[in-house]
Structures are given as structure tokens and as C-alpha cells.
Image: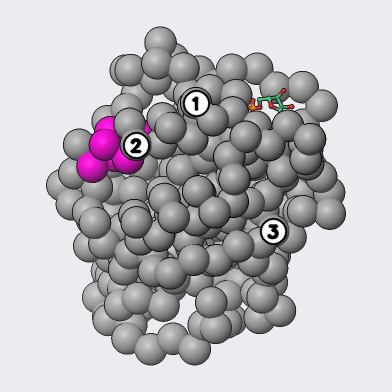
Amino acid sequence: MTNDSPEEETRAPGSGRGGVGGGKGMTRRNRADDNVTILTSSMDLHRVGRSRASSSTDPAPSITSSVDLSNSLELSIQTRIFKIIVIGDSNVGKTCLTFRFTGGSFPDKTEATIGVDFREKAVEIEGETIKVQVWDTAGQERFRKSMVEHYYRNVHAVVFVYDVTKMASFRNLQTWIEECNGHRVSASVPRVLVGNKCDLVDQIQVPSNTALKFADSHNMLLFETSAKDPRESQNVDSIFMALACRLKAQKSLLYRDVEREDGRVRLTQQTETKSNCPC
Ligand SMILES: Nc1nc2c(ncn2[C@@H]2O[C@H](COP(=O)(O)OP(=O)(O)OP(=O)(O)O)[C@@H](O)[C@H]2O)c(=O)[nH]1
């Protein structure tokens, strides 16, 4: 299935649908825009899943708790979720980048990702709270083969990562792009290129000009950054915020009007066309 537009939803990871206009031009070392506010720290989706599961086994809700449930359901319905996948060779720093964005720190120790890790962060863009759901995928073939379909299903945006100190990880980008295209990710789904580990200045193998040409030829934005260097943290945020802004700026299906009839929730579609997002 191709992806058409971001969609507001309340479902589990991977159930999103849609995508928006592709990248254009080049951006380097972008800084987060002042208009963009990060609302919460990271939230592990596994934890969310567990808490939802446990509430479903609770005793029958009292009147008060069902009101609470209705309110939280409405809030949840009104929050759009953007699914962004992070792909690239093993060891390029995908996990560290997602940690830096969702948790604001660099992990002391990482292990090879097996399958996928989900992390989520709520951000506010022009008054709307949006959940940016980051899928940190495994770079090693043996840890990804059974999951690949899930990565690409209903994805809203793709982040390709290479290691600026490893030319091979840059050359392999072509393979990652082909894999992405092979999974019917629409050309309209925005993609960005990230050169990570820029703090290792003495070891850089991939010149910026080479990366810029590659990004341009694939209609992608380029970010050169470091998940490790705290001075680069705003730049890491900019990767995901630029995508979120772009996704928000596009026409999207909104399920704004929540109506309840006979205890059921009815969702009414609306179309959003305007955006003042500066990104
Ligand atoms: N110097 C430096 N090291 C980094 C940076 N980002 C990640 N690393 C290190 O690179 C190694 C791999 O990082 P990960 O984030 O686990 O790499 P990955 O791409 O998620 O790897 P897989 O899970 O196998 O696909 C770790 O030792 C990190 O500490 C960075 O910006 N600078």
C-alpha cells in the first residue's frame, strides 16, 4: 500500500497511514525553530502498551472513571501520530539518534537493535500536539529480515543514516533506498539523509559535498550531526521536527469531531488545508 497522508489515530504502532510531499533542496545543520515546542520527554511505547493492557483488566469502571476514560479517549483521538522510521547500516548510530531526540541524552551503552525499538515523543507545532513515533530499526540483516514489512507499512517519513567516518555506510545508502522503494513507500513520503558522528572530526571519510550531491540527487534534506555531542542536540531535534512540520503542513485527514451515540464514539472526517508552519 502506498502512503497518502498523515492520519490522526489512536491505534498501536504500525497502524498509521499516509505520507506527504517529498523533500526538496538541501538543509545542513538546521536548528529547531522557535515556533516548535517539545512538550514531553520520551515515552517508551512498550510501557504505554502495558499500561493500556492493564487498564482493560481492571474491574468495571465507576461513573467517574468512565468520564475520565471518555476524556482521555477524546484527547487521544485528537492527537495525530507520525510514524518515522530510521534505517541504515548497523553501528551508524540510529539508536543513539533516536535516544537523543526522544530522551535528550546519549546512551552510555548500546547493543545491536533486534527487530525494532519504538520511541515516541509529543511535540507541539503551531498549537497542535503531535506524537512523533520513531521506529529505530535493526541494521544487521539477521535481526531485521522478519520485521522489514512492518517497518515500511504505513510509514509517514524515512530517515536514512550513515556514519561520516565510514564510507561503506554511505555507499550502502543506495541499497537502503532500494529496499525502501521495494516496499512500495510512495515517492511522496518525505525522506531525509543524516550523516552521524560528526564529532569524530579527525576520522571523517565522507566529504560534505559528496553527501550533499547524493542528497540532492535523491530530493532529500541533508543533516550532518552527532548524537553524542550535546551541543548538537538541537540539530538532532531538527531532523525529526523538520519532518513533523512538513507532515503537518500537508493536507491531512483529521478526525476532529468526536460524537458519542449510544455510548459509541463516531468519528467525523475533516480535511485540513492550511499551515503556517515555518519549516
Ligand atoms: N563518536 C560517536 N559515536 C556514536 C555516535 N552515535 C553513536 N555512536 C556510537 O556508535 C555505536 C553504535 O551506535 P548505535 O546507536 O547502537 O548504532 P545502530 O545504528 O543503532 O546499530 P544497530 O542497532 O546494530 O543497527 C555505539 O558505540 C555508539 O556509542 C556519535 O554521534 N558519535
Question: Is 124 drawn above or below residue 272 in the view shown?
Answer: above
Between label 3 and label 2, give the one nearer the viewer: 2
Label 1: few (<14), some (14–19) or many (≥20) C-alpha neighbours in 10 Å: some
Residue appearing at x 53%, y 77% in the figure: 279
For residue 107, the mark is none
Residue occupying the far left of the picture: 1
Q: Disc 1 and disc 3: Cα gap in Å?
A: 24 Å
Position of 197 compared to 69: left or right?
right
SS of the residue at dot 3? helix
For residue 174, the mark is 2
Label 3: few (<14), some (14–19) or many (≥20) C-alpha neighbours in 10 Å: many
Instruction: Name the amino acid, label 2.
Output: Gln
Instruction: Name the amino acid, label 1.
Output: Ala
Residue bearing mark 3:
235
Residue appearing at x 41%, y 50% in the figure: 214
Q: Where's residue 14, x and y in %?
A: 36, 42
Identify the magenta region.
Answer: 176-181
